[in-house]
Image: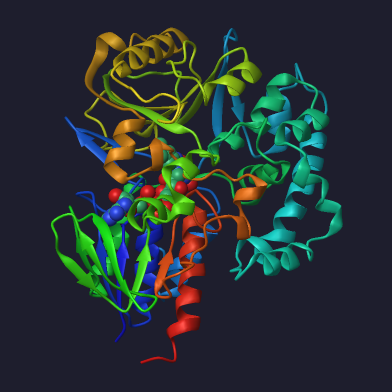
Amino acid sequence: MKKVVIIGSGLGGLSTALRLAKKGYDVTILEKHITPGGRLNVLEKDGFKFDLGPSFMSMTFELDELFNSIGEKNPVELEELDPIYQVFFEGKDKPRKIYKDLKKLEEEFKDVEPELARKADEYLTRAGHFFHDTEDKVVKANFNNKLEYILKLSRVPLKHLPYLWKTMWSEVEKQFKSEEVRIIFSLVAFFLGATPFQTPAIYSLLNYTEMRHNGYWRVKGGMYKLVEEIMKILNRLGVKIEYNTEVVAVNSANGSVTEVVDNKGRKWQADIFVSNSDAASFRGRVLHREKFSDEKLDKKHWTLAPFTIYLGVKGKIDNLMHHNYFLGSNFRGYADTIFTSSINPQKPYYYVNVLSKSEDNVAPEGCENVYILCPVPDLRYKKEWADKDELADNIISDLSARTGFDIKSNIITKTVLSPDDWASTLNLYKGSGLGLAHDINQVGAFRPKNKDEKLNNLYYVGASTTPGTGLPMVIISSKLVTERIEDEYKFIS
Ligand SMILES: Cc1cc2nc3c(=O)[nH]c(=O)nc-3n(C[C@H](O)[C@H](O)[C@H](O)COP(=O)(O)OP(=O)(O)OC[C@H]3O[C@@H](n4cnc5c(N)ncnc54)[C@H](O)[C@@H]3O)c2cc1C
């Protein structure tokens, strides 16, 4: 039985462990942190339970594919969000609710965007064609080299070509007249960790997955339930997991990894190694490859860094839903400067998730758990976060003013995580929340590959390798890396 060591237990690592263990590989996971899940994690404190990172998922059919592939029923219950979310624009007294139902959406924006249902339908139909024309050919495919990738791209119908050089903003600008609607349709760029002014128009396909194809879903019981259920299956399949175990070195001979060395000096041998640690920074910081040195990685485009606040609040905040966005009045100016600024944003834009709006037993009776996520510059631009309480207070005051609820005086528990915390806990490169960005020159064959260039039994899975970031993408990534390993090992007993 081939032995596999997986470095990291993010959703990418766990999904790979499920697939390989089911196929009969003997799998051990080495995890730096004290719990499994990586960014998909949980914070439990003073009777409150918060999703630590991801709070929703799209393309849930990828979850079904994962569990089907190992002959299991999807063990988590999912609930579709309807409305998907609400957006508070600065200076407006009422938030806008975002619906998948385009008639309802048109009604919501009837004062600013006539014929929204027709325009949105055109936009989503176009994005849908692109999604289906690329999903299997490009997104869910392994490439051995750039030529293979370009050949696969050349099979995508030519009508989609303009998507490649346009930005997402230019697409929405062309389609919608109102600034508010344009902003709504371009918010998905932030889920890719970038702004719509730099994100290629191809990612309007996310509008399609969000607003038509599959929608947004939450896991009943909190997102971490997914990790808990996966762990039960892995346990049944005999997968071993070691926590507090960070891989710090790799020993090799004759072009193959022989063992990895952890932070306590222990050595772990296997036939096959899969790194769920960031595919770019692992090559640089652990394998010491010149091409992936910090100096070179700093020049790449990384996604936004998370600044997160978890508040247990006494009382009920009526104006909030499960998902809420709070935006300022200068979208373009904010987006242009926020990611490269070295100071705290004065008027931050942020996302608020209130799990207690849709779940019982996640907060004490009569209380609310408020998770705030604010995109901020990564550690390349703002190295010091000693002033993090200042930004947290600023956001809490803004949220209090805009919801009309005095949050500050009702805080029972508060935890603040800045990019340096995210970086040190989970090895996120310079605190970048979603890993490498998805510019045209950083996707497909231009993204760090899922098979090592020099060591023939070392593979990669997760957000910074192919196909990209987000929960459904790292599940696809686990499928792609498993296919590669199977191609190369299935006939070797
Ligand atoms: C704040 C935030 C909110 C998000 N919200 C959403 C959302 O709502 N929906 C969505 O779809 N996506 C969301 N994402 C993105 C999503 O969380 C990630 O794309 C996905 O979880 C990445 O999974 P992964 O397996 O690639 O890596 P990770 O989750 O980062 O897991 C990697 C694991 O490897 C471990 N590790 C790293 N280096 C080593 C080493 N050397 N040795 C041993 N272990 C190591 C880490 O500790 C970690 O546990 C969010 C991300 C953040 C940060």
Q: Residue furthest right?
A: 159
Identify which residue, 292 or 44, lies in the foreground: 292
Can see residue 77? no
Q: Position of residue 203 (x, y in %)?
A: 67, 44
Q: Position of residue 251 (x, y in %)?
A: 28, 68
Q: Quadrant of residue 182?
A: top right
Residue depicted at 54% across the width and 60% down the height: 61
Q: Residue furthest front?
A: 290
Q: Quadrant of residue 71?
A: bottom left
Q: Position of residue 333 (x, y in %)?
A: 63, 16
Vertical arrangement, residue 61 with respect to residue 19, above or below:
above
In this rendering, position of residue 98 left or right of residue 448? right
Q: Quadrant of the C terminus?
A: bottom left
In this rendering, position of residue 195 left or right of residue 25? right
Identify which residue, 362 or 261, lies in the foreground: 261
Residue depicted at 22% across the width and 50% down the height: 35
Identify which residue, 264 or 314, lies in the foreground: 264
Vertical arrangement, residue 439 with respect to residue 416, above or below:
below
Residue depicted at 72% across the width and 20% down the height: 179
Vertical arrangement, residue 332 with respect to residue 439, above or below:
above
